[in-house]
Image: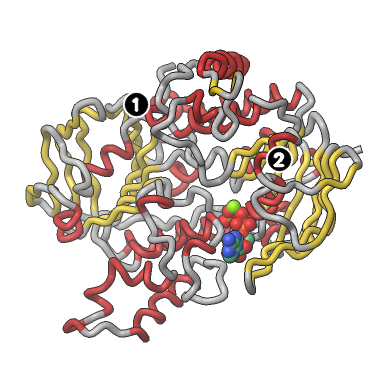
Amino acid sequence: MPFLTLSHIQKSFGGTRALTDANLSLHAGQVTALIGENGAGKSTLVKILSGVHQPDAGEIQLEGQAVRIDHPEHARELGISVVHQESVVFDNLSVAENMFVGDRPRERGWVSWRTMRQRAAEVLKQLDATFDPDAPAGSLSIAQKHVIQIARGLTRRARVLIMDEPTASLAHREVEELFGLTRKLSAAGCSVLFISHKFEEVFDIANRYSVFRDGASVGEGELAASSRDELIRLMVGRPVEQLFPKTPPELGEPLMRVEHLSRTGEFQDISFDVRRGEILGIYGLVGAGRTELAQVLFGLESADSGSIEVCGRRVAVKSVQEAVREGIAYVPEDRQTQGAILPFSIASNLALPNLTALAPRGWWSAQRETQLADEWVETLKVKTANTATVVQDLSGGNQQKVVIAKWLARKPKILILDEPTKGIDVGAKRAVHAVMDQFVHRGCAVIMISSDLPEILGMSDRILVMRRGRVRALFTREEATSEAVIRAATDA
Ligand SMILES: Nc1ncnc2c1ncn2[C@@H]1O[C@H](COP(=O)(O)OP(=O)(O)OP(=O)(O)O)[C@@H](O)[C@H]1O
Ligand SMILES: [Mg+2]
């Protein structure tokens, strides 16, 4: 008998039918992968299981008994532990406080800090985590924050562990650590639900799958008896071309040249150039200094020493305005907080960085705004009724697409993308790659930071590998193999 069963679940938000007929069963000691396109309803189901939303119809059974999961605390009492797609860790609280948030151990009415720290240390030890319960959560990496969320679940006995795209911003080694932990919990009898857009990971960690399309279940089974192509066909309803849409580059002169660039504590002595028509991939583990480098190139932070040239001219990129004036655009990894203005519509978000184009001579044109938005929604297949929808109401992956579109629409000379296809489904991933390819063929350059090895190998003309703030290797497309790139990125 399955440990947890969901039958015929329905859920609407206003006019949007997020789930129409969702079915799922989770078994003790098994890892089930939930897959589906952006907007298929995966996170909505997770929010129902974690007591954030109530279903409009349908039934949830736990060990054969119908249950109602009233609120998140109730879900935890039932042993359901969740790592949400948008990580909810409070940076200014300690690790232990985060683990017991809303649920601090008390003695005679008073919070017992000693018990809390002790219990936190026990759980962290169980997870082989090496960080201190007293450390401020803000000092941890994204990977470590995931561990806190899992640990939070384990402060109660976790019988169901749900992870909604936990690996989206993790590099190779951190994914392996997370999977090690997942296997351990699963072997101890926990039922695991794993959501990801990366098929290699699905086949690596899960033994069962369940596919959603447009809010309804369209298939489930054993992964051993299935193939990637078959899963994609179920998800999308048609086959998707899998090769990367990369055409031979036409390289021109260097557009950007960086020499001996350093920022204390973050990266040292970084030198590289990127030419017209080129995609330069930057690979490294989380913490290698890639994002910090991108932030300096875009004027969000300043370098302590070294130089940056654009089109052969030395520039001092001291602010974002200057970077934009030099034709540089940057799509940040943390698109939730740095990328989109969530309460604004898709159309306004796209219009914002493009006001000069939309308002020639100062006259803003609503028609042009809608036209621009329609074009990009179509290109990147954003799932929405229309471009007046507020970004907040889109699924995680569709929010990502809006932020990418917002900067692509600006037609910069040099485009810096940080984890461009994180959280994006297989069809849209291909669309983003195709846009990158067309972009460099217009004589522009792309700097692509990515932890997705197939993407790095599939799209880059050259690959720069960083480790602990330094350049460790530079490969041409021909030289690069996954082994060589991983070896350069890790200490081994
Ligand atoms: N609070 C909300 N208000 C309005 N619409 C919503 C809300 N939450 C989700 N939706 C809509 O419900 C649908 C399903 O969204 P959901 O987040 O479950 O998708 P998902 O499968 O998790 O996608 P992704 O892979 O992009 O994370 C989408 O069309 C989304 O816009
Ligand atoms: Mg989601």
Residue 235 placement: quadrant: bottom right
Q: Secondary structure at mark 1?
A: strand
Q: Secondary structure at mark 2?
A: helix
- Say which residue label 2 marks: 75
Please say if 286 is above or below 23. above
Q: Position of residue 428 (x, y in %)?
A: 53, 60
Label 1 is placed on what type of residue? Arg
Please say if 219 is above or below 72. below
- Say which residue label 1 marks: 467
Residue furthest left as drawn: 314
Q: Residues within 10 Å of mark 2 (few under 14, many from 20)?
A: many
Residue at position x 76%, y 29% in the image? 190
Residue 272 placement: quadrant: top left
Q: Position of residue 164 (x, y in %)?
A: 61, 44
Quadrant the C terminus occupies: top left
Q: Which numbered dot is residue 481? A: none
Report the image quarter containing ligand 1.
bottom right
Instruction: Pick whichever, 308 or 23, lies toward us.
Output: 23
Please say if 20 is above or below 82. below
Please say if 105 is above or below 142. above
Q: Earlier in the sequence, mark 1 or mark 2?
A: 2
